[in-house]
Amino acid sequence: MEYFCDMCLSTWKRVRDGELNHFMQPCSTCDGMMTWGKDVRESARRVLEVWGYAVENVDRVYVCEPNVYARRIPFRGQRVQFQHLEVKPEAFRAQQERFLSSYITTGRKEDWDLLHPSVQWLIAS
Ligand SMILES: [Zn+2]
């Protein structure tokens, strides 16, 4: 099962900060995100927008398929109802449903920000 590894996150930060201008680790998940932006630095900003907060706050963050960029919806105290998420794969779906349950319980920004942007768009509409 694909998950986002902490080592990859720190490398993406170095790319964003201009310390590296390419991504060196052979990692199939990261290879697919290299082209999220018009250059590798913009890709890094987008990777960190989508995954950074969750990877820093949760032990193991599962990656969706397809793993494409989506803009985050900022927290505005959205009230949402629980729904079963039509997302793949199973580990990602189960984790995102747990994050969604937490958010519904707490209503906190910290829990909203754990949700993947594609899930935020699903539940916001
Ligand atoms: Zn990686």
Image (spheres, rainbow, N blue to C red):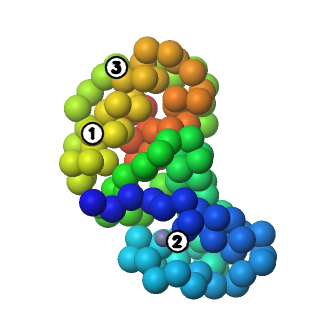
In this rendered view, identify the residue nearer to me: 63 or 69: 63
At 60% from the left and 36% from the top, the residue drawn is 74
Rendering coords of residue 43 (x, y %): 60, 71
Q: Is mark 3 on a helix, strand or loop?
A: loop
Rendering coords of residue 30 (x, y %): 47, 73
Label 2 CB sits under 8 Å from any ligand 1 atom: no
Q: Which of marks 1 and 2 is nearer the N terminus?
A: 2
Q: If the image is split into quadrants, where does the C terminus sit?
A: top left
Q: According to the image, label 3 marks what residue?
A: 81
Residue 73 visible at all: no
Q: Dot 1, crowdedness within 10 Å: few (<14), some or many (≥20)?
A: some
Quarter where residue 1 is shown = bottom left
Does 88 appear above or below 103? below
Does 114 appear above or below 71? above
* Outermost residue to the right: 18
* Outermost residue to the top: 105
Disc 2 residue type? Trp
Q: Dot 2, crowdedness within 10 Å: few (<14), some or many (≥20)?
A: some
Rendering coords of residue 57 (x, y %): 56, 41
- The residue mark sitting in front, 1 or 3, is 1
Q: According to the image, label 1 marks what residue?
A: 94
At 69% from the left and 74% from the top, the residue drawn is 15
Q: In this view, does 41 lie to the left or right of 34?
A: right
Disc 1 residue type? Ala
Q: Earlier in the sequence, mark 3 or mark 2?
A: 2
In this rendered view, identify the residue nearer to me: 43 or 78: 43
Q: According to the image, label 2 marks what residue?
A: 36
At 23% from the left and 54% from the top, the residue drawn is 89
